Amino acid sequence: MATTAGRLHAEHVVHTVGPVWSGTEDRSALLASCYRESLRVSSELGARTVVFPAISTGIYGWPLGDGARIAVRTVREAALPPITEVRFVVFDEEAYACFDDALTA
């Protein structure tokens, strides 16, 4: 689902709900689907740049390192034209290190 961006420096906001992490059930395909579907909607809207938070790694408990690897892998596999740039916005040094590791792997 996408909405206008209000006062943000963007044209649209694509909304997604990430899965809650489970230690007993592999939900990584659900997390990857959040990124993939957001990219699809962004592409349909004509976006050239997409910015993601670390989906599900906050209150939903997804381990940062695993979440970063899933995010980076999915974006690399699923980015569609006209998207030419994808950014990840993180809020602390631990998250930065996890995404840096995933991006340089």
Image: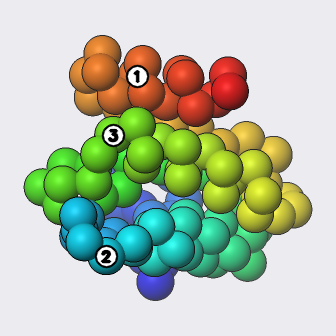
* SS for callout 1: helix
Q: Position of residue 88 (x, y in %)?
A: 50, 38
Can you see residue 45? no
Query: Badge 3: few (under 14), some or many (20 or more) residues near its Cα, within 10 Å?
Result: many
Point 47% across, 42% down: residue: 68
Q: Of marks 2 and 1, which one's residue comes earlier in the chain? A: 2
Q: Is residue 61 left or right of residue 65?
A: left
Number of disc labels: 3
Residue flagged by tag 1: what amino acid is it? Tyr
State how far apart marks 2 and 1 are (Cα): 26 Å
Q: Of marks 3 and 2, which one's residue comes earlier in the chain? A: 2
Foreground mark, 2 or 1? 2
Foreground mark, 3 or 1? 3
Residue marked by disc 3: 64
- Between 96 and 50, the one lying in front of the other is 96
Residue marked by disc 2: 25
The answer to which image quadrant residue 27 occupies is: bottom left
Point 18% across, 54% down: residue: 61
Q: Which mark is residue 104?
A: none
Q: Position of residue 5 (x, y in %)?
A: 41, 62
* SS for callout 2: loop
Q: Position of residue 67 (x, y in %)?
A: 42, 49
Residue ranking furthest to the bottom? 1
The answer to which image quadrant residue 100 occupies is: top right
- Between 28 and 4, the one lying in front of the other is 28
Point 31% across, 76% down: residue: 25
State how far apart marks 3 and 1 are (Cα): 10 Å
Residue marked by disc 1: 96
Residue flagged by tag 3: what amino acid is it? Leu
State how far apart marks 3 and 2 are (Cα): 17 Å
Do the CB atoms of the residues marked 2 and 1 lie less than 8 Å apart?
A: no
- Between 43 and 101, the one lying in front of the other is 101
